[in-house]
Image (cartoon, helix red, strand yellow):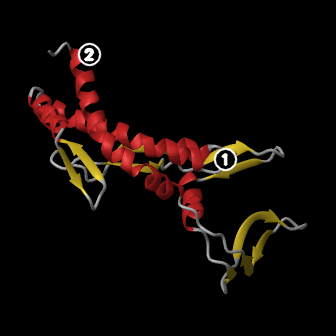
């Protein structure tokens, strides 16, 4: 079995499978073949998505549910690619363990988890920070100074990619071939 091996990336490609893929792609219409390649890439990256979902801390489940694989924004027919991203929902509401209704934005929440926050005192000279809290007279509470703790970041998606990238890279070819074969079976193409 002849293999192409890239020592830099750790990718091992079986030449026979690559030739089989090229031959199979030529049997399909060009547009269908390109779509099937994207399907295969998506299935391969789902290995990383599943690993990232397992690592995300469970508070409401909103961040875990919002992780998904999509076609890249600048993906073209000649250079297809997919990305793992957070669903851009504006907000998700849930009830926490103490019965309090909580609203979160998964993308913002992930940003804080991945990159952490700078600690220190935040101040403002203008109207102050506004919270959804009122004093005894019903006026909005305006705070001029906040002492914010520093939170250490933990990039769950990056860590999941580091653990699964070799498997994803080595199995991508199989996923693409499987996607094409599945299309042929469903459409009765020999």
The residue under the point 49% across, 52% down is 160
The residue under the point 74% across, 81% down is 145
> For the view shown, which residue lies furthest in the top direction?
188
Question: Measured from the top left, where is residue 136 in percent x and y?
Answer: 91, 66
Give the position of the N terminus as an image quadrant: top left
The residue under the point 44% across, 41% down is 47
> For the view shown, which residue lies furthest in the front direction?
1
- The answer for how far apart the CA atoms under marks 1 and 2 are is 39 Å
Closest to the observer: 10 or 189? 10
Q: Which residue is mark 2?
A: 186
The label on residue 58 is 1
Label 2 crowd (10 A; few <14 / some 14-19 / many >=20) = few
Label 1 crowd (10 A; few <14 / some 14-19 / many >=20) = few
Question: Measured from the top left, where is residue 42 in percent x and y?
Answer: 35, 40
The residue under the point 60% across, 45% down is 62
Give the secondary structure at mark 1.
Answer: loop
Pointer 1 and pointer 2: residues touching (CB < 8 Å)? Answer: no
> For the view shown, which residue lies furthest in the right direction?
136
Closest to the observer: 118 or 21? 21
């Amino acid at each position: 079995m002849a293999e192409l091996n890239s020592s830099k990336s750790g990718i091992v490609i079986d030449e026979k499978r690559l030739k089989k893929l090229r031959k199979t792609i030529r049997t399909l219409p060009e547009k269908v073949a390109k779509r099937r390649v994207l399907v295969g890439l998506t299935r391969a990256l789902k290995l990383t998505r599943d690993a990232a979902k397992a690592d995300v801390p469970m508070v409401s489940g909103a961040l875990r549910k919002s992780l998904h694989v999509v076609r890249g924004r600048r993906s073209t027919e000649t250079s297809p690619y997919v990305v793992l991203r957070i669903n851009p929902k504006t907000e998700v509401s849930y009830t926490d363990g103490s019965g309090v209704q909580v609203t979160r934005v998964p993308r913002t929440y992930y940003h804080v988890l991945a990159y952490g926050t700078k600690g220190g005192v935040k101040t403002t000279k203008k109207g102050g920070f506004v919270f959804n809290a009122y004093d005894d007279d019903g006026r909005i509470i305006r705070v001029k100074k906040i002492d914010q703790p520093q939170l250490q970041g933990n990039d769950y998606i990056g860590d999941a990619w580091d653990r699964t990238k070799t498997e994803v890279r080595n199995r991508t070819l199989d996923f693409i071939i499987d996607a094409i074969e599945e299309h042929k079976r469903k459409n009765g193409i020999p």
